[in-house]
């Protein structure tokens, strides 16, 4: 289980900011910063769930309270969006000094806008994920009843989520100085935008504008009927799992597939050979097989969120892994000096007329092209024999054999 520690660090205005770090149980493969929503704190349930899910995959996460909020020092009335971005940079600096430079930023609502702006100032960032983020930081002005009164009087007390906050004219004026979509357009990092279509605080059209402005690789995940603060535990858990699995694809130190695989039972007790898949909103699909949990998805070009491999990616992975395992076992049994075997599989569809090397002579062909690389002091006879054994791996024989698929309604006998 991840462990939690508290910390504090100083921002550029000599204010002590209160933070919390979720540490992985094992080695720290990467670090991240989580920025909370406007007037929220690091103790928001969604922030804790996302942080713990990332820690489960080897990513240490620093969550902290912006100046003037939560347990941090400072006067909220004296803060601006610019100062919030400065606080983010200070948080990244703290991670760099105490652990390692962050490679991932995650932000909720206005915190999402802040991490996008901060990413432009932090060269080590590889990936940024936002939850319900606005496409224009001046969007928050709709929360204030009378912006002109704030400007005329210098500040005013407003009620936000049932709590009073003093909003300054400097805060309101600073909002107009930032052009978020232009910044997003210039970012050379992987981007994930999560947004609920029914979000009545920050409309989902904001996600569309951010997505259209962003470069590839970029992904969008719909949060179905979730609310802006992710009050429902299931929604918060879903967001945590999606971000954690997606991040592993873009952080070099975190294995992409391994990051999405989590045993839910102790090793050696995987006695249930049933594989199940569940798809709710969007195409992101949760898979459970022999006690392990994985994600499958589709490319954004066909409406997916790119949060995991496609079903055909998994099929190719099954053939590749089975081939390598089979050759490893054969070489060990025969005493062959095979040091390592690497198998690459590519899948495509071709018509028989366009494939001179295919056995089938008509119709469409589902083709797997397998490349096997053998390392070791192997003579030509041994190499030829091992390549022949590749065709005897169980998955190869299943795919090329007689297959029947029977479908029945769930719950029936």
Image (cartoon, helix red, strand yellow):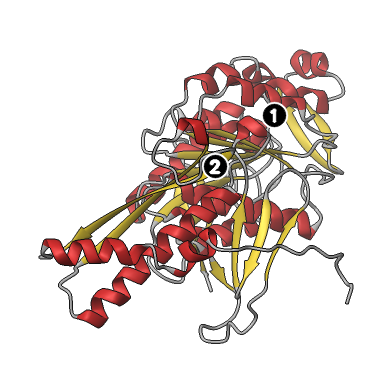
Few, some or many residues within 10 Å of mark 1 (<14, 14–19, 20+) = many
Could you tell me residue 157's position as x and y percent?
81, 31
Is any part of residue 84 visible from this angle?
A: no
Q: In which quarter of the image is the C terminus?
A: bottom right
Q: Residue at x 34, y 56 (%)?
A: 343
Left or right relative to 400: residue 137: right
Few, some or many residues within 10 Å of mark 2 (<14, 14–19, 20+) = some
Could you tell me residue 106's position as x and y percent?
56, 43
Front position among marks 1 and 2: 2
Mark 2 highlights which residue?
365
**Label 1's element?**
helix
Q: Is residue 270 above or below residue 293?
A: below
Q: Which residue is drawn at 47% across and 30% down?
A: 354
**Label 2's element?**
strand
Q: How far apart are the alpha carbons under marks 1 and 2?
A: 39 Å
Left or right relative to 86: residue 339: left
Q: To which quarter of the image does residue 299 belong?
A: top right
Q: How many labels does the image show?
A: 2
Q: Is residue 336 above or below residue 222?
A: below
Q: Label for residue 319?
A: none
Q: Label for residue 207?
A: 1
Of residues 125 and 100, the one nearer the viewer is: 125
- Residue at the far right in the pictured view: 412
Of residues 149 and 340, the one nearer the viewer is: 340
Q: Residue at x 45, y 59 (%)?
A: 319
Left or right relative to 81: residue 10: left
Q: Residue at x 82, y 34 (%)?
A: 201
């Amino acid at each position: 289980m991840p462990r939690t520690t508290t910390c504090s660090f100083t921002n550029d205005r000599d204010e002590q900011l209160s933070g919390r770090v979720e540490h992985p149980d094992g080695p720290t493969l990467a670090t991240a910063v989580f920025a909370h929503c406007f007037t929220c704190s690091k103790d928001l349930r969604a922030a804790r769930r996302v942080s713990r899910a990332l820690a489960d995959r080897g990513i240490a996460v620093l969550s902290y309270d912006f100046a003037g909020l939560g347990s941090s020092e400072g006067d909220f009335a004296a803060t601006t969006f610019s100062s919030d971005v400065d606080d983010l940079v200070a948080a990244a600096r703290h991670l760099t000094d105490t652990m390692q430079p962050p490679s991932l930023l995650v932000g909720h609502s206005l915190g999402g806008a802040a991490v996008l702006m901060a990413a432009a100032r932090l060269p080590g960032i590889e990936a940024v994920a936002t939850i319900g983020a606005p496409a224009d930081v001046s969007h928050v002005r709709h929360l204030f009843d009378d912006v002109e009164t704030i400007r005329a009087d210098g500040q005013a007390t407003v009620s936000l989520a049932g709590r009073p906050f003093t909003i300054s004219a400097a805060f309101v004026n600073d909002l107009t100085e930032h052009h978020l979509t232009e910044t997003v357009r210039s970012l050379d990092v992987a981007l994930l935008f999560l947004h609920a279509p029914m979000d009545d605080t920050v409309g989902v059209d904001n996600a569309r504008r951010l997505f259209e402005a962003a470069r590839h690789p970029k992904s969008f995940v719909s949060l179905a009927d979730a609310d802006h603060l992710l009050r429902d535990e299931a929604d918060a858990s879903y967001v945590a799992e999606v971000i954690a699995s997606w991040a592993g694809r873009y952080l070099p130190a975190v294995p992409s597939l391994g990051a999405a695989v989590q045993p839910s039972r102790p090793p050696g007790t995987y006695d249930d050979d049933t594989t199940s898949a569940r798809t709710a909103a969007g195409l992101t699909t949760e898979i459970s097989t022999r006690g392990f949990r994985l994600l499958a998805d589709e490319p954004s070009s066909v409406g997916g969120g790119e949060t995991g491999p496609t079903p055909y990616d998994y099929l190719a992975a099954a053939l590749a892994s089975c081939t390598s395992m089979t050759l490893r076992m054969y070489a060990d049994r025969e005493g062959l000096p095979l040091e390592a075997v690497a198998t690459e599989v590519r899948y495509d569809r071709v018509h028989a007329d366009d494939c001179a090397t295919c056995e089938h002579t008509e119709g469409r062909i589902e083709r797997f092209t397998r490349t096997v690389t053998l390392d070791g002091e192997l003579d030509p006879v041994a190499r030829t024999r091992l390549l022949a054994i590749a065709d005897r791996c169980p998955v190869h024989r299943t795919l090329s054999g007689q297959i029947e698929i029977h479908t029945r309604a769930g719950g029936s006998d």
